C-alpha cells in the first residue's frame, strides 16, 4: 500500500555555487513546487536536511531561515542532521506526517555548500566531514571517510576477491551516466586506466574512486495518495521507507564486509512495499566511494554478498543492464552536496519513474529504490518508489 | 484527547560537565529509562536534539553515536537541530510516531556542551550561538542573541511601560526557584539590586537578566496512552504539541513586541488539548532573557499583551502565585544547555504533574505547559501535559 506520493521534484545543478544556501535551496524548492503546481501558501511544513552548515558557514537553525526566504507562512519547519542521510531522514518524517494526516502538502529538501561559499580548503573540509566520525575513537586517529570505507572495502577484497579493477568500473559507469545528466558535476566520461592511474587517497581508493565536494540543493513536494491527482506533476508513489542505524565507531560493528544499517533498513522498506529485490528495476545508491556502491547493491539484495563487484565489471549495473544503478551519475559523478543528496536521489527516482529522464532513461522503470547512508555506515534510509 | 504519554523522565544536573556528550546523555537517558523501568532492548527509536555540537566539538551525526553508546539496537535514530528548540522538535516527532503507531516506546532527549568540553571562551561561544541568527543580515552586523531579545524588549518597554525593575523581578524569582532545585546551575538567591547593578550586556539586559552557558542532558520515555500503565513511572499525558515558525531575520517580522511563532504554536497546542489558558496551572517557559519570559507568558495567554511584566513584580508567577512560571528555575537559574533545554522542561512538567517536585512543588498541578523557542524567536514548540 502506498504511504504517500511525490507530485513535484526539482534540484539545482550540482557543482560549485556562489549563491547563499537560502538562494540555492530556493532554486531547488521552487523547481519542485513549480513541477507540482503548488503555491507557497499551500505548503504546510518544511522538512529540511543540512549536515554541516554550522561548521562550514556558521549557519544553523536553517529550517526557518529557508522557510522565510521562500516566503512560507508560519508553518512548522524542522532541520534534520544525520550526516549524508540528512534529507532522507527529513523525507521519512514528512511521509509519516502525511500518512498520519498531520499535513496534506509538505516540502522536503536539502541544501549544502562544501565548496563555493565556505572558503575552506581540502584539509579544513576534510576535518568538517570528519565530524561525523566518532569523536573520541575515530577522529583522534585521523580516520577520514575515505579511510573508513577503504577499511570496509579492503575486507571485502580479502574475503571475496574484489579487485581494484572492478572498483574502477563502478567509477567508469557512473561517469558515463553523469555524462548524460546536465545537472551532474562531472559530465565527462573516464576510462578504467584513468581511475587506476589517479593518485592514491586511501588504499584501495584512488582519486577517481571518490565522490567530489559539491554544492547544491534538491527538493520534493509530498502529499497523500488520495490528493495526489490534484497537482500538475505526475504522482509517483512512496511504498516503503526503512530507517536503521549501526554502531559507531566502526570497531563496534558486527561485520565489516557489509553495511548492516542498510540491510536492516532495506528489509523494512521492502516489507512495507510488499516487494523483494527481484521487483526492483533500478536504484540510486550512496556511492561516496566505489566500494560503497558494491556494498550498497549487496545490501539491497540486488546481488548476493560478495557478488557486487562483478556487477559493474559485467556492465549489469550500467544503463541497459539488468539493474541500472545510479543512472543519475550517483554521488561519484552527479556530485554530493551532503544535505541535498538524499532528496536528489528521490528527484532522480521521480523523473525515471515518470519516464522523463531523457537520454539516461531506464527502460521499463516501474519500481525504483533510493539508498542513502550517513556517517561511518551508521545511518541508512532506504526508499521504495513506484509508478502507477 | 491524549496523544501520547511520558512514563519516564530524567536529566543531569545543569552546569559544567567534563564528561563527553555521549556519557552526559547516557546519564540523563538512563535516569529516564530507569524511571520508566524499560530496558535498552525495548527502545524502538531515538529522537535526539543537539544544536551546536558541530561547531563546539566538531561532533555531528550524533544520533547514532548516542544510540551506540547507550547500547540500543539497530533502531532508527535522528538528530534534530532547531537551535534552542532542538529537543522539543525531536519530541514533537516522537509524539507523532507514537500516535501513528510507527513505534510503541521511544527515547527523546538532548545534550549539549557549551562550557566544559568545548575549550571555547565567551567571544568564541557567542559567535557559535550567533550561528542561529540570519547569516547575511544579522551576523554581519554583530547581532548577538542578547541584542536580539533586547530589541524586542525595548519595544515592549516603549509600548507598554515595562521597566528594568520589573524585568529584574523575573530574574529574582527564577533564582529563588532555582535555589529549590538541586539540579539547577545557580542555586543561589539574588535580590533586585544585584540584578540592576550587574554589568550591562545589551540594553536593557544586565548580566543577571541573561541565562548562562551550560552543559547538561535530559530525556523522556514516550509511549502510547494505551500502553502507558505497563511501566514503572507514573504516566503523564501529552495532550497538545504546537509548532510554528516566524520570519528570519527579525526585521521581517510583523510585530516586535510579541513572539508570533509562540502565539501560533500555543493556539495549535491548546486546540489539540481542548483547553484555554485559564486551564493552565503552571508553565516552564523559554526565559533566555528576562524580557523573553515576559513575552512568553503573554504568548501563552496567561497575561494580556503588555501585562506580562507586572506578573513577576506582583509575585503572581512565583511559587504560590496564580501562575507559577519556571518552578525549575528556568533557563535563567536552572541553566540552558541548548539541545537539552526542551526535554528538561518536559522533565520538570512530569515531576510537577506527578507531585514529585519536592520543595518547589506547584500546588494542585494538573495542567502544565512547556514553551520552548529557537533562534531569533523564529521557532516555537508549545507542549501541554496533564495529570490523569
Image (cartoon, coloured by chain):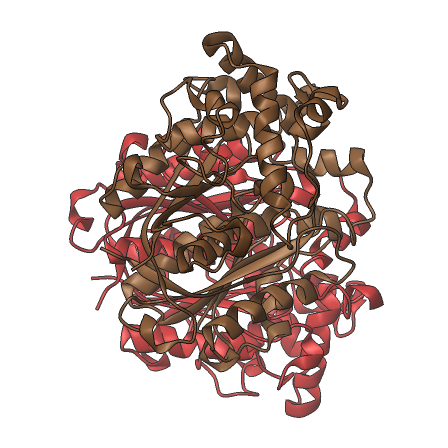
Chain colours: A red, B brown
Tally the numbered discs.
0
User: On the image, which quarter does residue B61 sit in?
Assistant: bottom right
Q: Is residue A184 among the parts visible in the rendering? A: no
Q: Nearer the viewer, residue B146 or B322?
A: B322
Q: Position of residue B271 (x, y in %)?
A: 24, 41
Query: Closer to the camera, B97 or A188?
Result: B97
Residue A71 higher or lower than A264, as above or below:
above
Which residue is rendered at x = 46% and y = 69% of the image?
B45
Where's residue B228, x and y in %?
33, 70
Residue A20 image offset from top left, x and y in percent: 59, 31
Residue A75 vertical position relative to residue B386 in the rendered view, above or below: above
| Position of residue B217 measured from the top left corner of the image (x, y, whole percent) | 62, 57
The N terminus of chain A lies in quadrant: bottom left
Can the viewer see residue A301? yes
Seen in the picture, residue B63 relative to B364 is either above or below; the reply is below
Q: Nearer the viewer, residue A221 or B88?
A: B88
Amino acid at each position: 500500500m502506498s504511504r504517500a506520493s511525490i507530485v513535484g521534484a526539482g534540484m539545482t545543478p550540482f557543482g560549485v555555487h556562489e549563491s547563499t544556501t537560502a538562494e540555492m535551496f530556493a532554486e531547488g524548492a521552487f523547481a519542485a513546487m513549480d513541477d507540482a503546481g503548488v503555491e507557497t501558501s499551500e505548503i504546510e511544513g518544511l522538512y529540511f536536511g543540512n549536515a554541516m552548515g554550522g561548521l562550514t558557514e556558521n549557519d544553523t537553525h536553517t529550517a526557518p531561515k529557508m522557510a522565510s526566504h521562500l516566503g512560507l507562512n508560519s508553518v512548522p519547519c524542522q532541520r534534520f542532521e544525520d550526516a549524508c542521510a540528512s534529507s532522507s531522514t527529513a523525507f521519512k518524517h514528512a511521509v509519516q506526517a502525511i500518512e498520519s494526516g498531520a499535513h496534506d502538502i509538505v516540502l522536503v529538501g536539502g541544501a549544502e555548500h562544501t565548496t563555493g561559499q565556505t572558503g575552506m580548503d581540502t584539509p579544513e573540509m576534510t576535518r568538517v566531514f570528519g565530524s561525523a566520525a566518532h569523536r573520541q575513537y575515530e577522529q583522534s586517529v585521523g580516520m577520514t571517510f575515505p579511510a573508513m570505507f577503504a577499511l570496509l572495502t579492503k575486507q571485502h577484497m580479502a574475503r571475496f576477491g574484489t579487485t581494484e579493477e572492478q572498483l574502477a568500473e563502478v567509477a567508469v559507469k557512473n561517469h558515463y551516466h553523469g555524462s548524460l545528466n546536465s545537472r551532474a558535476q562531472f559530465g565527462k566520461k573516464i576510462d578504467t586506466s584513468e581511475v587506476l592511474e589517479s593518485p592514491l587517497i586511501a588504499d584501495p581508493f584512488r582519486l577517481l574512486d571518490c565522490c567530489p565536494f559539491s554544492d547544491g540543493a534538491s527538493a520534493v513536494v509530498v502529499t497523500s495518495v488520495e490528493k495526489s491527482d490534484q497537482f500538475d506533476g505526475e504522482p509517483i508513489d512512496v511504498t516503503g521507507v526503512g530507517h536503521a542505524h549501526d554502531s559507531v565507531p566502526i570497531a563496534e560493528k558486527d561485520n565489516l564486509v557489509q553495511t548492516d544499517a542498510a540491510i536492516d533498513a532495506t528489509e523494512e522498506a521492502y516489507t512495507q512495499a510488499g516487494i523483494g529485490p527481484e521487483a526492483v528495476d533500478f536504484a540510486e545508491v550512496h556511492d561516496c566511494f566505489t566500494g560503497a556502491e558494491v556494498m550498497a547493491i549487496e545490501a539491497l539484495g540486488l546481488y548476493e554478498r560478495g557478488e557486487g563487484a562483478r556487477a559493474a565489471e559485467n556492465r549489469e549495473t550500467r544503463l541497459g543492464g539488468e539493474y541500472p544503478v545510479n543512472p543519475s551519475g550517483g554521488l561519484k559523478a552527479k556530485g554530493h552536496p551532503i544535505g541535498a543528496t538524499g532528496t536528489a536521489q528521490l528527484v532522480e527516482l521521480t523523473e525515471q519513474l515518470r519516464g522523463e529522464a531523457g537520454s539516461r532513461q531506464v527502460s521499463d522503470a516501474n519500481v525504483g529504490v533510493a539508498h542513502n547512508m550517513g556517517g561511518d555506515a551508521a545511518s541508512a534510509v532506504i526508499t521504495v518508489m513506484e509508478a502507477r
